Amino acid sequence: MTSRKNSSLIEVVYVGKIIMILFLTMSSCQRQVSCHKGDIEIIDVLNRNHPIEINLYDIVDSVKYVPLGTGECLLSEIECIKNDGKFYFVKDSRGVFVFDEEGYFINEVGHRGIGLGEYVYSDNFYLDRDNKLVCLICNSERKFYNILIWELILIQFN
């Protein structure tokens, strides 16, 4: 009889723990669409179920269109564009390409291929402005490629 009481008590404690964990989990789940931190409004861009319409001129002061001269470099499926102040870095499905501030093609970042120092596919890239590096992120190879190109570009114009 004592063993049956102990097993009932253990079941009650076990169920109680599960209910407590579920309660804590459910009560801690919150979704915040937007909030204000000082004078800066934070917008939840991952809120795909309830999209909001934003006028471009509500979040930027001016827009500058730079037509890219792609005679030497044909672009397809542009995924990302970054600017360092002097150059535009454009990533498409084939690689990362550099254009000057007027939109003229300068260079491709690195070389695609399977040889030494080449990359198969660039998943993303970031600009290390302090060291003047373009870092290609290649997830399939689990490598970062640091390609020093800003100095080479500046030498070409002098």
Image (cartoon, grey):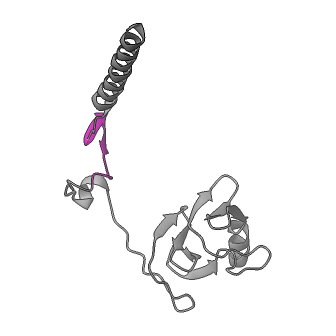
Q: Is residue 152 left or right of residue 38?
A: right
Q: Residue at x 74, y 73 (%)?
A: 155
Residue 77 sits above or below residue 130 on the image:
below
Report the residue that reaches farthest toward the front.
1
Q: Is residue 52 left or right of residue 133?
A: left
Q: Residue at x 25, y 43 (%)?
A: 33
- Name the quadrant of the N terminus: top left
Q: Is residue 115 left or right of residue 56?
A: right
Image coordinates of residue 105 in percent, x first then y, are 57, 82
Q: Residue at x 32, y 56 (%)?
A: 60
Report the residue that reaches farthest toward the top.
2
Which quadrant of the figure has residue 2? Answer: top left
Q: Report the magenta residues as a range.
A: 33-47
Image coordinates of residue 79 in percent, x first then y, are 46, 71
As for residue 42 lying within the magenta part, the answer is yes
Q: Residue at x 27, y 37 (%)?
A: 35
As for residue 70 lying within the magenta part, the answer is no
Residue 83 sits above or below residue 93 on the image:
above
Image coordinates of residue 4 in percent, x first then y, are 37, 14
Query: In the image shown, does 30 or 99 lie closer to the viewer?
Result: 30
- Name the quadrant of the C terminus: bottom right
Image coordinates of residue 115 in percent, x first then y, are 77, 79
Which quadrant of the figure has residue 84? Answer: bottom right
Which quadrant of the figure has residue 27? Answer: top left
Residue 145 sits above or below residue 8 on the image:
below
Query: In the image shown, does 92 or 65 lie closer to the viewer?
Result: 92
Residue 51 sits above or below residue 6 on the image:
below
Q: Tell how many labels.
A: 0
Query: In the image shown, does 146 or 158 lie closer to the viewer?
Result: 146
